[in-house]
Image (tube, rainbow, N blue to C red):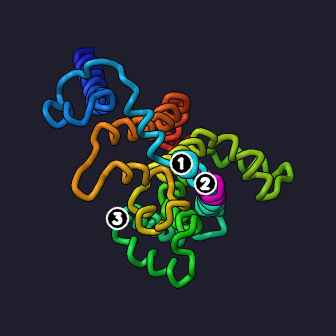
Amino acid sequence: MKPRKMESKAAKIGAYFVVIMTLVPLLWLVLLSFKTNNDILLNPLSMPKGLDFENYRNAIEKIPYLTMIKNTLIVVAVALPAAMLLAVLAAFALSRNRAIRRTVREKYRLLFVCGLIVPQSVLILPIYMMMVKLKLWNTLWSLILTFIGWSAPLSIMNLIDAFDAIPDSLEEAAIIDGCSAWQLLFRILLPLVKPALATVAIYTFLGIWNDFLLSRVMLNGVENRTISLAAMYFKGQFSTDYALMAAGVTILIVPQILVYVVLQKFIVSGSTAGAVKG
């Protein structure tokens, strides 16, 4: 009993440590958003003198949030369903298609693992050159197509693990009952991997929402900028308004926090899907 109690206590301590390390920077950011720029520079660790929302009002007035949110939602509305569909089809074929030899399936899996290893920053230059040649630079399509490709390795690997956890007997019974491959996928298997689907969708959404590097390289005009580029408006050539930046970044992370709070059970269950095969 003692080793189990010690492991349980260590797990709790680790969980508390992770929570503290996550919440402290967020709390500090919120506190900075209620201070003036001079207060931040002179004493960044001090408490704000009051809850003055002037920084938030100035941030909203300075940044074209509506245009940026509209552009971001357009990218999400096109890239997310396309990426999900491609990931589902690829994972289904690699996990459940017995006509494909096991060695072939493992080679394809290795390719997706390599896609996770290669840093995205390394791919920026060739993607930029490709979009220029396709005349898609400075358009939202440059982001949409790139996000579909970037999300594929992680999404496919997560869904493969989820599909692998489904017993073969269930698939065999469905085929005996006359299910086609499409019916097997959409009517039987997909409802069983909903947590994994939700996890993939959440990570893809957050990847699009948080991306800065790709949007900075691909988008030049103000009318096409996404919400991740909002922080650029707070930095001048010779100075930075840290108070406005803190307020603006706080506004940016609120939707992400809400997504995590509302859908945290799907994130946890989806992340562990496939850890133990049935």
Q: Nearer the viewer, residue 249 or 154?
A: 249
* Secondary structure mainly formed by the magenta segment: helix
Location of mark 3 (residue): 119
Asked if one can make out residue 42 in the rendered structure from this viewpoint, the answer is yes
Instruction: Name the residue carrying label 2.
Output: 80
**Other residues around mark 2 within 10 Å, as few (<14) / some (14–19) / many (≥20):** many
Which residue has dot 1 on it? 205
Crowd rating for badge 1 (residues with CA inside 10 Å; few <14, some 14–19, many 20+)? many
Residue 223, label in figure: none
- Residue 83 colored in magenta in the image: yes
**Amino acid type, residue under disc 1 in the picture:** Phe
Q: Kindly identify the residue that appears in the image at 53 percent across and 72 percent down.
A: 104
Residues 197 and 257: in front is 257
Residue 152 visible in the displayed image: no
* Type of the residue with mark 2: Leu
Label 3 secondary element: loop
Judged from the image, the secondary structure of the residue bearing numbered disc 2 is: helix
With 78 as the anchor, is 113 left or right in this view? left
> Picture coordinates of residue 226 (x, y %)?
51, 55
The residue located at (23%, 51%) in the rendering is: 239
Q: Counting residues from the N terminus, which is met first, the one under dot 1 or under dot 3?
A: 3
Give me the C-alpha separation between circle 3 and circle 2: 21 Å
Q: In the rendered structure, does residue 137 fall within the stretch colored magenta?
A: no
Q: Is residue 77 placed above or below 258 in the rendered structure?
A: below
Quarter containing the C terminus: top right
First of labels 2, 1 by sequence position: 2
The range drawn in magenta is 73-85
